[in-house]
Amino acid sequence: MTNQTARYTRDQMAARVAQDIQEGAYVNLGIGLPTKVANYLPTDREVFLHSENGLLGMGPAPAPGEEDDDLINAGKQPVTLLTGGAYFHHADSFAMMRGGHLDVCVLGAFQVSAKGDLANWHTGAPDAIPAVGGAMDLALGAKQVFVMMEHQTKTGESKIVAACSYPLTGVACVNRIYTDMAVLDVTAGGLQVREMAPGLTFEELQAATGAPLLKGQ
Amino acid sequence: MIDKTFESLERAVADIHDGATVMIGGFGNAGMPSALIDALIAQGAKELTIVNNNAGNGETGLAALLKAKRVRKIICSFPRQTDSHHFDALYRAGEIELELTPQGNLAERIRAAGAGIGGFFTPTGYGTLLAEGKETRLINGRHYVLESPIHADFALIKALRGDRWGNLVYRKTARNFGPIMAMAARVTIAQVQDVVALGELDPEVIVTPGIFVQRVVKESA
């Protein structure tokens, strides 16, 4: 039985990702859980947040009453622009990803495979209306692609799998996975455990994971 | 004297024909040229192919055009949203065709049309459902997918200010697809908050030069 208390909270996960984002990095935070990472970037570190609808230097949400319908993020929520920030059109914005100019993007996922394949845009359900947005561009569009997700689904199935059963967003594109149980690197040899939630054993982590893990060094 | 300004929204959209391909600027409601869309709904053109990032939000703008059943096909990246009920209903009823394209491909396909590019290879989408049936190529060890440009008969875009030569500046993230759609359409119609005199727009900060714009109309016209 896996120890159910040995889990990182969502805020701890966000803080852990933030720890790996260096001064001066150009970073895109995906919609959902990754958005939380912004709250944990140290204030003494200058990091450039990119939003694919067309801004660099994205700041926090505005104070109530200060919202501007023309200043939104990729999730269509009101945001602010930091001093020194810039606006640009969509082709330039996606060239920042597609041209490999971003240092890090942090994405949510349904599944990640042992080879770093990513599935995060479509459940494949026959009645679902498909919507992809910038997911496929982001999956390939940064020097490092981080995934941040719960380790298991609500029904206890591993989201880390030998091969994705959901439609792919990108092939062999994920570099690192942050879950509520562990931090894993996708390497040529397999999934390497970097860190585990306090109290969790390697055997418990392996039992909760749908692909073989390599023990941390 | 060249004067691209139009006296009324109605006149600016008068020649949009049935079956036309119409690009509509905006990301969600930021940059959505709602005054031009309302004029298009009143004008009555139908069987349109629409190019937009989304498929309408709420009840206004593109959502209202869909509700009026004027759209045969939509090319977009992200149709499904919490407030896209008009699109959802048409899609489930089989009354609208959807061409789903990754957002960066959408932007680049529009840009390519504007720049006279016949097609381009991109890694985005390789190995996914959205690249099925498309030509692929291995270039320097990386897999790429061939994507084609998207041309349009008309582009309806929203800018902050424009002058009689069609030069435009935008406001914040409402810029989004405006500059590239202006390049890709045969006729670009810009809805602006204010028409200003030639020379009032600083040439160093003009975002869309007038060569890409055929009509400028005040959003309150």
Image (tube, coloured by chain):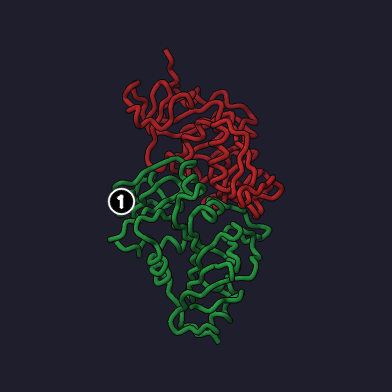
Chain colours: A green, B red
User: In which quadrant of the rendered view does residue A16 lie?
Assistant: bottom left
Q: Does residue A170 appear in the picture of this structure? A: yes
Residue A189 screen position, x and y as percent? 59, 70
**Residue corresponding to mark 1:** A65
Nearer to us in this view, B15 or B10: B15
| Residue name at image x 62 percent, y 59 percent | A168
| Residue name at image x 50 percent, y 35 percent | B180
Q: Chain of mark 1?
A: A
Nearer to us in this view, A177 or A8: A177
| Residue name at image x 40 percent, y 29 percent | B168
* Horizontal side, residue B87 vs residue A54: left or right: right
Q: Does residue B90 appear in the picture of this structure? A: no
**How many labels sit on residues?**
1
Residue A128 screen position, x and y as percent? 63, 57
Q: Residue furthest right?
A: B133
* Position of the N terminus of chain A by quadrant: bottom right
Residue A179 screen position, x and y as percent? 49, 71
User: In which quadrant of the rendered view does residue A121 lie?
Assistant: bottom right
Relative to B134, residue A167 above or below: below
Nearer to us in this view, A119 or A154: A119
Q: Residues within 10 Å of mark 1 (few under 14, many from 20)?
A: few
Helix, strand or loop at label 1? It is: loop
* Horizontal side, residue A179 vs residue A207: left or right: left
Q: Residue furthest top?
A: B1
Residue B211 screen position, x and y as percent? 47, 24
Q: Residue furthest front?
A: B140
Relative to A145, residue B212 above or below: above
